[in-house]
Image (cartoon, rainbow, N blue to C red):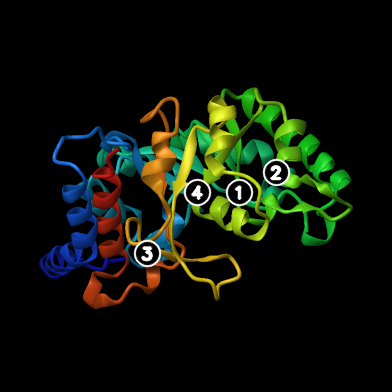
Amino acid sequence: MARPEINRRQFLSAVAGTTAAVSTATIASSLSASAAPRARLIPRGRIGIQLFTIRNLVSELGFRAVFEELSRMGYRHVEFAGYTSSAEPGITPARIRQLLDDNGLNGIGGHRGINDFRNNMEAELDIAETLGLPYIGTANEPVSPGNRTVAGYKAAAEEFNGFGAAAAARGLKWYHHNHHNEFRFAADDPGVRLYDLLLSETDPKLVYLEMDIYWAYAGQHIAPGFEPVEYVKANPRRYPLFHAKDGASNPDNPNGYDIVEFGAGDIDFASFYRELRAVGAYISLWEQDNAPGTPPELGGAFGAAERSYEAMSTLRG
């Protein structure tokens, strides 16, 4: 199947024009705050992307075209949300690995469904090994909405420990990615925050955590009483990966924020990263759930990717 061509001149022109518009206020604020150079909070070599963000482009253009563009922009790490593309029917994990290598990209992790691990654990680990992924895990909530109880989360933690043990036996690390509901209080015990229970009941040597910073702040909005960064500071070795997803404050949104491009929102990423004991030691993966809806005149999802990379790489503190 012929690969759809990217009109690079049009794309780069759109990105160049809109990058300035989106980032002018941020740059002006930074320059006025201090003329002294400050360290990068997210080193360029530790910036990646969750491919769910540009799922439309993976489907329409294929992994090869997408990896070429991501590499050109400066991204170095890729987190998968699936291993197929309509533009490349029959593509194999081995071929995807070759495309990663060809473009200087590193497969860092993959999101799979809990049932994929329940039913096909060894096959999932086989694929992760082929892609060279050090991490493999899930973005599913540990339990169904009707089972947000102490017993429900304890049972889920026990299952997660089993997933982690299976991954560890193959030299891999298994991880869980949060959304906002994990930060709610248990339905049968309002004194127990479910996320606290998940941390205490899972083995830190077997179950790692990927903090989605946006969803942690949304969790803070719906169930106040914690600071997202404090979890990382208390358990630094359990959080190798972050989702750097930004949000604009919106009191009419039940989550407290609307998802926006990185650097265009109100989440104080500079303060978050400055609080960490080892700034620059984490892989930060850009994610924006609604990036496929970025208007063509703003460069589409690739435009959002370009601007967000620049905002992440210039975040200083």
The mark closer to the camera, 1 or 3, is: 1
Q: Tell me if I can see residue 126 in this picture.
A: no
Callout 4: helix, strand or loop? Answer: helix
Marks 1/2 in contact by CB < 8 Å: the verdict is: yes
Instruction: Identify the residue at image location x=20%, y=66%.
Output: 6
Marks 2 and 3, Cα distance to the nearest angstrom?
39 Å
Marks 2 and 4, Cα distance to the nearest angstrom?
14 Å
Residue 287 x/y as whole percent? 43, 55
Q: Which residue is mark 1?
A: 178
Residue 85 x/y as whole percent? 43, 60
The mark closer to the camera, 1 or 2, is: 2
Marks 1/3 in contact by CB < 8 Å: the verdict is: no
Marks 3/4 in contact by CB < 8 Å: the verdict is: no
Q: Which quarter shows the C terminus?
A: top left
Q: In the picture provided, is 256 more to the left or to the right than 3?
A: right
Please give the label number shown on residue 213.
Answer: 4
Marks 3 and 4, Cα distance to the nearest angstrom?
32 Å
Q: Amino acid at mark 2?
A: Tyr
Q: Amino acid at mark 3?
A: Ala
Callout 2: helix, strand or loop? Answer: helix
Q: Which residue is mark 2?
A: 195
Q: Which residue is mark 3?
A: 87
Give the vertical position of 64 relative to 15 (above or below): above
